[in-house]
Amino acid sequence: MFKKIGIFLQMIKFEHTVFALPFAFMGALLGSVVMFGALPSWAQIGWVVVAMFGARSAAMGLNRLIDRVSDAKNPRTAGRAIPAGLLKIGEVVIFIAFSFFLLFWAAFKLNPLSMKLLPIAVFLLVFYSFTKRFTWACHLILGLTVALAPLGGWVAVTGTVDLTSMVFYFTIVFWLAGFDVIYACQDVEFDTKEGLHSIPVRFGVAKALVIARVFHILTSIGFISLFFMTDLSWWYAAGMIIAYIILFYEHYIVTPNDLSRLQTAFFTMNGVLSIVVFSFTLIDLVVQYYK
């Protein structure tokens, strides 16, 4: 049983939760303090975790199920659970259904707006996995999908959507889209051969890396905007300086002629960035709350 659980966690790349979960917490914290001047309850945080796990697990399970044929052809992904025969299609379908149940349950326990926005979230979670088949804008659609985590954290504790929450949402959209473009550079040859779409396929690796930089410049502008739109102070500003250094280094180590450190740029740098931004935001809000 534990071996099977490990295979499921490997299938959904559980370690990649580090990208979105800290920002989901940040959305909950920021929304609660901005709207109510108080930190969210532990119960709210708990349901945010359940919703996040359900949404991400359903999305990754669907992605692996829908892409199983192309994954089997790609040497980089042929070892994934479904093409490698480690999981049966029926098992993955049950896993996806259970994951959606967790998402629905958490949304129901949070507030009415969470339930009203649920159809949009489910649509994007399902729709994203098909986008590489017809549009190079798939990276932006991935961003729109995964960035529902921080927006969902905000909605979970406030029951509202406002300008600040949308700035936060699109800040994370462009951050995710940017590093997904970088990640896609390693599959240009395979995607071209299979007729799959991506920014690197459409514009070439060199231009794709420039586009990724533009996306991350927009991310930087978004983080700065949050500083001026809220009561965040110098703790948050210090975290932003570190985050900008990380983004600069991420783009510095990946060039069109050298993709050897792509995994470092994709996983390590962005994982550290999300933790840094959340941690400094948490410190900032807690210090202000207990003054």
Image (cartoon, helix red, strand yellow):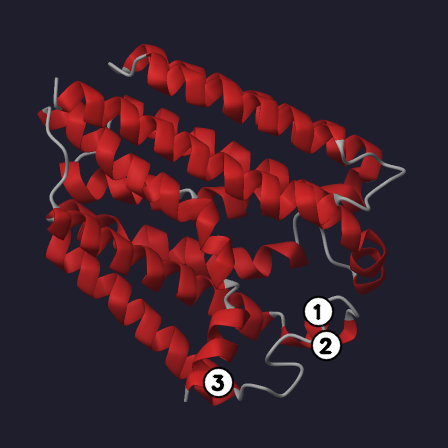
The residue labelled by disc 3 is: 3
Task: In the rendered view, tell whether residue 204 sits above or below residue 108.
Answer: above
What is the C-alpha distance between the residues marked 3 and 1?
20 Å
In this view, the residue in front, 70 or 82, is 82
Q: Amino acid at mark 2?
A: Ala
- The residue sitting at 12% across, 57% down in the picture is 109
Q: Who is closer to the viewer here, 72 or 135?
A: 72
Question: Which of pointers 3 and 1 lies earlier in the amino acid sequence?
Answer: 3
Say which element carries label 1.
Answer: loop
Circle 3: element type? helix
Secondary-structure class at tag 2: helix
| Quarter of the picture holding the C terminus | top left
x 28%, y 44%: residue: 152
**Which mark identifies residue 72?**
2
Residue 215 picture location, percent across and down: 60, 28
Q: Which residue is mark 1?
A: 77
Label 2 close to label 1 by CB (< 8 Å): yes
C-alpha distance separating marks 3 and 2 = 22 Å
